[in-house]
């Protein structure tokens, strides 16, 4: 499970709880070694390459990768006068990143006044995701944010009857839906296109990007904006739902075995982190 975002155990919206006799602190941070080789590319060059990356899981944030300074190319980091304060980790010094003809301000940071219980991050620097060209694990590009080893997706086929209505109009009816269980989200039901009245789906401009599933296209249904979506070419790991359609239960009526589904906590997507948002343009950057 994703540890710190959506409804993970360290997130503010956690659906479970730790069974402890005393209340836990309002905020719990978790640090662990990535145990994978990770590299950073900027200005067309590799500027960091490490097998000793530390991940920081912070409530309601994506995991952030911290590299040992000795694994960052000399001369790449330019100290600046900017200092901010992290509520848990103390003063934070910022760097510009410079590589050849390429320069980016406020593109990396280091916690320089760490409390004793967070010494794992001494001598380490993190790079702003969207300020860099790209991040890699070995020779595979990682999109969106540092990979969360606790994030999981399970997909199950079902013979339950699922029906979608827009007023009196039947938009979809299927006895072979597929349910996708994803860490931090309520279950999502997907329907084969053959079981959908596709004339009810009005394509709209704009896509969103999921690091685990790929690019999503959206559809209006009647007056309901973006009431359905589809990963037309989902990543191979979730290929079962590729080109199937899922529907927002708060925008159209979705019935499962005759019972109307109600929006559940965790059904909506929330933002994660001050230095980035998931951006489809990242997919188009070589």
Image (tube, helix red, strand yellow):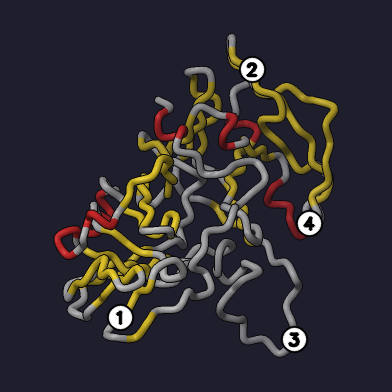
Query: Residue reaching furthest top?
Result: 101
Quadrant location of residue 132?
A: top right
Determine the residue positioned at 21% across, 62% down: 196
Residue count near mark 2 (Cα–Cα under 10 Å), binned few <14, some 14–19, many ≥20: some
Residue count near mark 3 (Cα–Cα under 10 Å), binned few <14, some 14–19, many ≥20: few
Mark found first going from the N terminus, 2 or 1? 2
Q: Distance between the residues labelled 3 and 1?
A: 40 Å
Mark found first going from the N terminus, 3 or 2? 3
Q: Which mark is residue 22?
A: 3
The quarter in which the C terminus is drawn is: top left
Determine the residue positioned at 55% across, 69% down: 7
Q: Distance between the residues labelled 1 and 4?
A: 45 Å
Coordinates of residue 38 in the picture (x, y in percent): 48, 39
Of 105 and 174, which appears nearest the observer?
Answer: 174
Q: Are marks 2 and 4 in contact (CB under 8 Å)?
A: no
Q: Which of marks 2 and 4 is in front?
A: 2
Q: Mark 2 points at which residue?
A: 103
Mark found first going from the N terminus, 3 or 1? 3
Q: Mark 1 points at which residue?
A: 256
Mark found first going from the N terminus, 1 or 4? 4
State the SS at label 2: strand
Q: Distance between the residues labelled 4 and 3?
A: 21 Å
């Amino acid at each position: 499970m994703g540890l710190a975002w959506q409804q993970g155990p360290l997130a503010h919206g956690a659906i479970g709880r730790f069974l402890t006799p005393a209340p836990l602190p309002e905020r719990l941070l978790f640090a662990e070694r990535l145990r994978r080789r990770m590299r950073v590319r900027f200005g067309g060059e590799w500027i960091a390459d490490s097998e000793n990356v530390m991940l920081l899981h912070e409530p309601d944030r994506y995991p952030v990768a911290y590299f040992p300074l000795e694994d960052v190319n000399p001369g790449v980091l330019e100290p600046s006068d900017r200092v901010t304060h992290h509520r848990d980790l103390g003063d934070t010094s910022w760097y510009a990143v410079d590589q050849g003809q390429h320069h980016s301000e406020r593109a990396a940071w280091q916690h320089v006044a760490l409390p004793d219980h967070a010494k794992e991050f001494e001598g380490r620097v993190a790079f702003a995701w969207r300020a860099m060209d790209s991040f890699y694990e070995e020779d595979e590009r990682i999109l969106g944010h540092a990979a969360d080893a606790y994030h999981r997706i399970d997909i199950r086929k079902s013979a339950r009857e699922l029906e979608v209505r827009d007023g009196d109009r039947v938009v979809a009816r299927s006895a072979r839906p597929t349910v996708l269980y994803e860490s931090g989200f309520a279950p999502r039901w997907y329907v084969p296109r053959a079981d959908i009245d596709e004339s009810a789906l009005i394509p709209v401009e704009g896509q969103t990007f999921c690091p685990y599933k790929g690019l999503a296209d959206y559809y209006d249904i009647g007056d309901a904006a973006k009431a359905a979506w589809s990963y037309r070419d989902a990543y191979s790991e979730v290929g079962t739902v590729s080109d199937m359609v899922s529907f927002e239960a708060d925008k159209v009526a979705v019935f499962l075995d005759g019972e109307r589904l109600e929006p559940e906590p965790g059904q909506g997507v929330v933002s994660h982190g001050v230095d980035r948002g998931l951006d489809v343009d990242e997919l188009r950057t070589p």
